Image: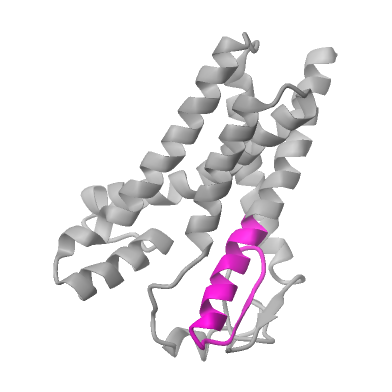
Amino acid sequence: MNGLRKYGRWFAISLIVFMVSIFLHECGHGLANSIAGIACSTGFNRVGDIYKFPSADDFRSYYSTAPSVLLDFGVPCTLFLSVLGACIYAKAKNRTLQYLGASLAAGNSLLRFVPSLMVLLVPLIKGKPHVEDEYETGALLAAKFGSDIWIYIPAILSVGITLFSIVWVLRKASGRKVSKPGIYAAVSFIVFCVGMVLASILDNYIRINWPAR
């Protein structure tokens, strides 16, 4: 029973941290768009027209025609939280702070590692690009510098940074002789899957509107 309570506590903390993290990720997109002069709304999963919800048929009627800009705080915010979480876990002596740090590192790492890996692997498997934040940034960099090599640089960086965070946490956990780290990892992936479903649901109810500056 103690084991179940321990993993249940990890699940609950990780899910709360994940939902806050993905919300901050979307706010990063909203703030960047606002600064770039593009009015929009953000929630937990999708960016669209200001004052509109994803359930609306014209949710992206304006946003889909807006010019793409390099300025973006969404991915940097998530990568920062990933590394910050690993740092907190490595330095913290308090169990609560360790849980917070590890959940920050795990949730935010998965939030960028999974889509970035798809950006890199889908073209090899299906022969067509997989569009995520990193791919869009890479495409803008390629257009700016005139070389297609830039297309996958952001995805490679995201994979590298998130792997660094994950490995740092796992090595520290090994040093602390954490029992059954594989179960914690499995629960973290379940949290990621559940969190993405919840994000799509909450997206239709909680929005922040970002007017153009």
Q: Residue at x 25, y 61 (%)?
A: 151
Quadrant (top left, top right, bottom left, bottom right) of the N terminus: top right
Q: Residue drawn 61% across and 43% down?
A: 192
Is 197 or 22 nearer to us in this picture? 22
Residue visible at 46% across and 84% down in the picture: 64
- Residue 160 coordinates in the image, percent (x, y): 37, 40
Residue 107: image quadrant is: top right
Residue 202 appears at what percent x and percent y?
A: 73, 63
Colouring = one colour
Is 192 on the left or on the right of 198, as rendered? left
> Is residue 138 placed above or below 210 in the rendered structure?
above
From the top left corner, tell me how far across and down residue 188 is, in percent: 62, 34
Magenta residue check for 109: no
Q: Please name the residue shown 52% across and 62% down the image.
A: 74
Task: Using residue 50 as the reference point, say whether residue 29 is left or right of it.
Answer: left
Q: Give the side of residue 20 with respect to residue 80, left or right.
A: right
